[in-house]
Each structure stands twice: as C-alpha cells, then as structure tokens.
Image (spheres, helix red, strand yellow):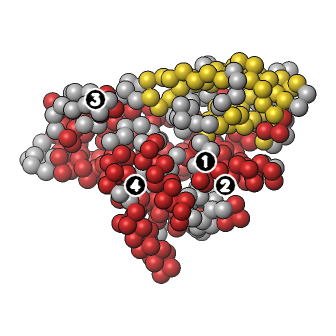
Amino acid sequence: MELAFTEEELAFREEVRSLLKEALTPEIIAGNKNSTTSLGDNNAAMAWQAILHKRGWAGVAWPKEFGGTGWTSNQRYIFNSECERAGAPKLIPLGLRMLAPVIFRYGTKEQQNHYLPKMLSAEHYWCQGYSEPGSGSDLASLKTRAIKDGDEYIVNGTKIWTTHAQYADHIFCLVRTNPDVKKQAGISFLLIKMDSPGIIVEPIITLAGDHEVNQVFFDNVRVPVNNLVGPENEGWNVAKYLLEFERGGSAVATRLQVDMAELNIMLRDLPEEHELKKRTAITNIEVAALSQMETDMQAKVASGKNPGAGSSLMKMMASSLGQQIATLLMEARANYSIPHNNRLLLEGKETIGKEQGQTITANYLNARASSIFGGAREVQKNIIAKSVLGL
C-alpha cells in the first residue's frame, strides 16, 4: 500500500516547509538536538509552541470547534514528518495530545472553555498522575484516595515517574473514590492545581543525568468537585480513552531515519566488510520496513479504517530500533562516547571529545526506558496475542 498525496496536500507540505524555513531558529534546533529526554528540551518546545500558536497550528490534532487546526490525518502526518526532518522540537504532549481529547469528549462546557484555550497558549502546563509505586502496568491497582468532603475531594497518596511535574502548574490524576468495588470500578479522573497546599514534588534524576521525571506526594490536598472529569467512579473509562493510540499523523520512522543518516555519515570511511557497517545495513533495512508499516497504517487511517493491533507492533518495533540505533551510535563513536557529557552540557561546562558525541551516552541510557513507557513491551505483546492470535 502506498500513500499518495493530493495536490492540496502537496501544497500544504510546501506551506509547512516554508514555516520551518522562516520560523525554526538555530537556537530552537540546537536546544532540541542537545536534549536527551523523551519529550525533548522544554524551552525549545515552549518557543516552538508559541510560534505555532500564533499561526493557529498548536492544536495539530484538534478539531476546529475547539480551536485546533482541523487537519486531516494526512496533513498531520505531513506536518509531523517535515518537523522531524527539520529538527523541530516535539510539542509537549501531556496537555495537547493526551488531556485535550478527554476534555473534548468528557469535559463540561465550563471545563472546555476554561482549560482548552490555555493548553493551546501554554498558559497551563500539564503533567500526568497515573503511575504509582507498585501500580505501573497494573494501573487499576492504584491506591491514591480521594474522599468527598462537601464540595471538595480530599486527596492523599503519591504518583511516580511523573514527567515534567517540575514545570507543570496542573496535573490530571487518577484517584480511588470507592475502595469497596472491583478495582477498575472505583476510580475517578481529577484535575488538580500543582500549587495546591499539600502537594510536594521530589525530583528523580535518570541515569542520563536528566531531571525529567518526579515523584509527587498528595497530603490532604483539597480539590473542587467541579474538577471531576466524567462521572465519579468511571475514571477508568476516561483513562482508557486517554491511552488510546492517536490514530494517524505518526512519524516515528522519520525520526529514526534522521538518526540513521547521522550514523551512516559517521561510518562512511569504514570498509564495507566492517562488522559495524554490516549491522548498520541490517538496521537500515529494518527502519525502512518500519517506514513502510507506518505508511500502510497512515493510508488505512486516512481511508477511515482502524489501525488495530498494528499500532502495538509498531510501538514495539520503534522502541527496539531506537535502542538498536543508540547502541550503534555508541559503538561508532567508540572512545568518544565514553565521557558522560550530558551532565557537563546541563551545567553549561566544556564537554569532552568531539561535538558529535556530546549526547550519545545519555541518549543510549535514556533509550533503555523506551520499551517500558507509553505501554510496556509485554503489554503490547498481550494486545497482539489477544487481538491477532485470539489467545
């Protein structure tokens, strides 16, 4: 299956390329390139969102009625692919791509009017309160409690691996509002201000040296009942809706192709029979296969079909290939990959070795988590086993 663009879509691609050429500054590109975290550099992402918001393009996958672009699936794919090739930062997805669809579907009119415009403008910065110590893949076993007290909930508990909680002024949170029913049935979905009395954010520094994730503690935090999204005790359905794969517009293979181009340049002087070059050639083929899968899925989505379990397979392939490429880059840079330059970069100090190797070690370490976050590899295998094999 091939993805054929219409004349209008090709014209749209030229419009995207023009914006990237005019507005994507070297500073934003450098900030994005030097970041080794899963969501990229925060300052670069905020600067890029401001540019897109001014043009009316911040809500890439939003319907027009809520202030979004109203783009088709193919337009989103074109936009994301061109941004990846140009080195643009990813927009921080926690509000724009994760919470926003929930507010579209489950939010009250008042919640839609209050929160959605502030997501687009980045006046509100969101983080996600899902995982807890002991409740990761088995999310329904969460223990953070919310007890109703008049027109407020009192929240106690903790969330962990909370990405960008150090920047966020709001958190969307799963809490247990009824402990006396089966675990999926007693969960609710709350919106909480991060400056509420009783909230403490403790940093978790990764192996890469980045402060990307945190643990958030709730000690008798009072939350207005009006901040409940969807019916009380039906937050599990809201959570499942949020976790659905964003159908269409993905450009994971494009990003990996950019990484492979860098790797191929690093290896160009090696003889063809070199073991590292042979492994790289195999990886090139695998990335091309992923690109074809992505194209096929995009064509399906554009025609109105469901991506099905193919999205789980692509997620597994993308995370595995990302780890594979990170390993090849480490080996290609050889001794120059050994210094952990990320800490020096974060502290604004002079780095060791060649500039091309500044972030290789940190990227390698960060990539280890890609097969866990966003749906662990084992969870994806279970989805495939159930949906495809009928097990």
Residue extending furthest toward the bottom: 7
Alpha carbon of mark 2 to alpha carbon of mark 3: how far? 38 Å
Mark closest to the chain's N terminus, 2 or 4: 4
Alpha carbon of mark 2 to alpha carbon of mark 1: how far? 8 Å
Asked whether disc 3 touches disc 1, contact meaning CB atoms under 8 Å apart, the reply is: no
Q: Amino acid at mark 4?
A: Ala
199 up-or-down from 121: above or below: above
Alpha carbon of mark 3 to alpha carbon of mark 1: how far? 31 Å
Corner quadrant of residue 85:
bottom left
> What residue is shown with label 3?
344
Number of marks: 4
Measuring from the top left, give residue 165's x and y in whole percent: 56, 32
Q: Of tags 2 and 4, which is closer to the observer?
A: 2
Q: Is residue 39 visible?
A: yes
> What residue is shown with label 1?
123
> What residue is shown with label 2?
117
Q: Which of 116 and 267 lies nearest the eye of the viewer? A: 116
On residue 88, which mark appears? 4
Asked whether disc 2 touches disc 1, contact meaning CB atoms under 8 Å apart, the reply is: yes
Q: Amino acid at mark 3?
A: Leu
